[in-house]
Amino acid sequence: TSFIVEIDSIATPDSGKKTYVILPAKKDMVGGELVFQEYARYLKHVLSAHGYREASDPEQAEIAVMLAYGISAGSMGSGTQLHRDAWGNVTGASTENITGYARLIIIRAYDYKKYKESKAEVQLWQTTIESNGSSGDLRRVRVFPVLIAASQPYIGTNTGKKVMVTLSEDDSRVITIKAANISQ
């Protein structure tokens, strides 16, 4: 299965701050939730590849990395599937109803020290990751690691526009992300 992923990332000039803590972006999301912890482990691997280090004490973190993710309720549509013989010739077609889901991850980094000192929300960067597909479960078909792997080169950078990346679940970048999550 191939995934088409859109990444849009914007950043201020490098602040030199690299020590972070990952926090849930939504007030109703709890940082101790098992799903949040799993997704945070994927994100830690990507941040590490960019030279970021997780703070051993969250109070010592320079950056608060806010993680939000979600998936739409799904919308119905129809699609046509072509049937082919062994030589690739079209032998027929069928139309079927398809449910599509919009999947979204938003990662924002803020100057955590400034926030703790004065409650000023100074954003350092934001990376938005979007994908549409037939799975309504971020975990069931491992959509989350695919989206994170596609975004890895762009996390915390400035893309200047939306960037499209296509990769499959068995792409080496995805396998690396999954393996890192298991070993943590």
Image (cartoon, rainbow, N blue to C red):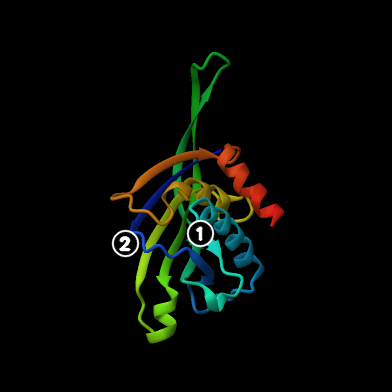
Q: Position of residue 20 (x, y in %)?
A: 51, 67
Q: Which residue is mark 2?
A: 12
Q: Residue furthest right?
A: 183
Relative to 36, say whether 92 is above or below: above
Q: Which residue is mark 1?
A: 52
**Front-most of 176 and 6?**
176
Q: Position of residue 65 (x, y in %)?
A: 48, 67
Q: Secondary structure at mark 1?
A: loop
**Which tag, 1 or 2, sits closer to the chain's start?**
2
Q: Quadrant of the N terminus?
A: top right
Q: Residue furthest bottom?
A: 118
Amino acid on which the number 1 mark rests in the picture:
Tyr
Left or right: where 37 falls relative to 121: right
Q: Residue furthest front?
A: 16
Number of marks in the rendered image: 2
Q: Secondary structure at mark 2?
A: loop
**Front-most of 111 and 152?**
111
Cα separation between marks 1 and 2: 16 Å
Per the rendering, the mark at residue 61 is: none
Q: Position of residue 165 (x, y in %)?
A: 43, 41
